[in-house]
Amino acid sequence: MAENRESFKSRLGFLMVSAGCAIGVGNIWKFPWLCGQNGGGIFVLFYLVFLVIMGIPIMSMEFAVGRASKRSSVEGFKALEPQGSGWHVYGYFSLAGNILLMMFYTSVAGWLINYCFKFLTGSFSSTMSQGEVASVFTGMLGSTSQSLIFMAIAVIAGALVCYLGVRKGVEKITKVMMTGLLVLIVVLAFHSLTLKGALDGVKFYLVPDFKKAAEIGYNNIIVSAMNQAFFTLSLGIGAMEIFGTYMDDKKTIGGEAVRITVLDTLVALLAGLIIFPACFSFGINPGAGPELIFITLPNVFVNMSLGRVWGILFFLFMVFAAMSTVIAVFENIIASFMDLLHWSRKKSTIVTCIGILILSLPVALEYNVLEGFQILRGRGRGPLDSWDFLVSNLLLPIGSLIFLMFCCSKAGWGYDNFIEECNKGDGLKFPKGKVIRFYCKFVIPVLILFILVMGL
């Protein structure tokens, strides 16, 4: 399949789709509530540092493996590994990681589509109490029909885009969604900054409070920031590697990794500028946690002038973010089946769509038909938490460590081969010095192992 692999029509298309894979619910849901619980500005500071010292190098390595091999993870490792070695075995785990991710991410995307629909049809109104707003979320989760219908909409929509191909589907649709996402986030952030009392929210969000940080505990803040910086870029399960297969040699990989990281970070930071000024303006706790998006913010919108309009725009923005990731991960799975089984895009898309619909059922039914059902019983986790735990706490860090070792070890592809591939083309070059080599071979692995241990 490598010789017939489609490519993006434009460099902008590659950047938008790759950024769309990284930009998702983690940026716009998880980042703000972690930031709110970990002291605001001090969390943001550590988050930015870890993005630079961990995220960009590992993303560069995934892209390099993809561009050099022009194949998805399993076949990509096979093409570059020394003869007789078994690096390619991890490719099957990375494929499993993408499937596991879709098994719960599709339901979350469905919740966001549902909320956008609810604001559009007037399910939220200014006369609602806080309890009534909260009951909308619990009612949505408890409804079997709503859970199944909106999960299916997310799955089928993602599959249809990939069915059209890389250029006509994935690139074209994602560019439209990402453009809409960027426009909406700027409009929403500007509106939040005009609210009364917004400046207090901005100070909490962007000005480090070292006294508050000491109360929370620097260790807690650093661990949370490291985890979020690491996971926000979707590294370790070949999600970025697949887009490296569509790259040409005109631009350096390091430069493209920096641009995608900047775009991903810009969206996360702007999401905070939407949420925290609004929270402080309406006297709502910014450290509300996971309920921030589905319960706290709707309470803000129903009390806001033209709240229904702002609610529609906010959840449309959230839908764009979630669906850009759904499409990107779908493309990864479909391309992997095309490489491994030599299927056509049509067959691979149809089989993947049906498979993901079936595998997404446990999470869609978790809060209604399967209420109380647990997968990881010792940890008290239902399907959503179980799949998220396996992906986020195991496959992502382990996978990133494997990509790192593969690119830095003589027993793998080797650091010199990685550097040569990474620095092809015009743009920012990946440093070649001994210090950087030592840092990639020894320091980053220690940081990843730290994340893995803390996650467990």
Image (tube, helix red, strand yellow):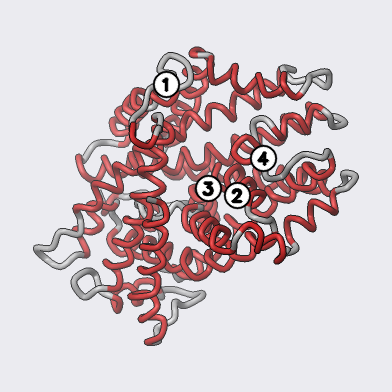
- The residue sitting at 20% across, 59% down in the picture is 87
Instruction: Classify 10 Å Cα crowding around label 1: few (below 14), some (14-19), many (20 and above).
Output: few
Question: What is the x, y in percent for residue 410?
Answer: 21, 75
Q: Which mark is residue 17?
A: none
Nearer to us of marks 2 and 3 is 2
Name the foreground residue: 217 vs 234.
217
Residue underneath mark 1: 372
Residue underneath mark 4: 288
| Disc 4 from disc 2: Cα separation | 9 Å
| Disc 4 from disc 3: Cα separation | 27 Å
Q: Is residue 246 above or below residue 54?
A: above
Mark found first going from the N terminus, 4 or 1: 4
Which quadrant of the view contains residue 305? top right
Name the foreground residue: 183 vs 98.
98
Instruction: Classify 10 Å Cα crowding around label 4: few (below 14), some (14-19), many (20 and above).
Output: some
Q: Which mark is residue 34?
A: 2
| Disc 1 from disc 3: Cα separation | 34 Å
Please say if the residues under marks 1 and 3 sit with CB atoms less than 8 Å apart.
Answer: no
User: Callout 4, which amino acid?
Assistant: Ala
